[in-house]
Amino acid sequence: MIAKAILALATGSVLASTVFSPAMAELATAADLTGKTICWSNGNKSSFLPDGKYSSPFIGDGTWAWTVKGVEIHTPMMGVVLDVDKQPDGTFKSKIENATGKYCE
């Protein structure tokens, strides 16, 4: 009986937070990144060129490709799947970059 009450409370809490929460971040799409440069709050700039080339003063030049897990980047310095989450206000956030970002002006 107590277990049913706890389950009902937990289920209700999850539904309420999903239905009534403000818009949530989503993984950035290829369209969000192609031909764009993101200026990160940590000083990095990630350039996602339309031909699949990538450039960053932090990790160098290489290639990029969008995947369902994130942005796969390969440079001579490293290979990484970068988590680029687009926020409801159009800015970006990345745990790997440990930064927030926006399109460079």
Image: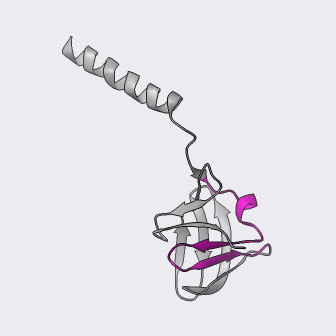
The x, y position of residue 67, in whole percent, is: 63, 60
Q: Toward the viewer: 75 or 21?
A: 21
Q: Residue placed at 20% from the left, 15% from the top?
A: 2
Q: Residue at x 61, y 59 (%)?
A: 91
Instruction: Name the residue furthest front.
Output: 105
| Image point (55%, 44%), residue name | 24
Outermost residue to the top: 1
* Magenta run includes residue 46: yes
Q: Vertical placement of 2 versus 95: above or below?
A: above
Between 70 and 48, which is closer to the camera in this rendering? Answer: 48
Q: Where does the N terminus fall, quadrant-wise?
A: top left
User: Closer to the camera, 55 or 24?
Assistant: 24
**Residue 85 screen position, x and y as percent:** 57, 57
Q: How many marks?
A: 0
- Can residue 25 be seen here? The reply is yes
Picture quadrant where residue 27 is located: bottom right
Quadrant of the rendered structure where residue 102 is? bottom right
Residue 84 x/y as whole percent: 57, 62
Q: Seen in the image, is 39 located left or right of residue 79?
A: right
Give the quarter of the image for residue 34. bottom right
Let me know if residue 76 is in the magenta part.
Answer: no
Whether residue 93 is situated above or below residue 4 in the rendered picture: below
Q: Is residue 21 above or below residue 104?
A: above
Magenta stretch in the rendered image: 27-50
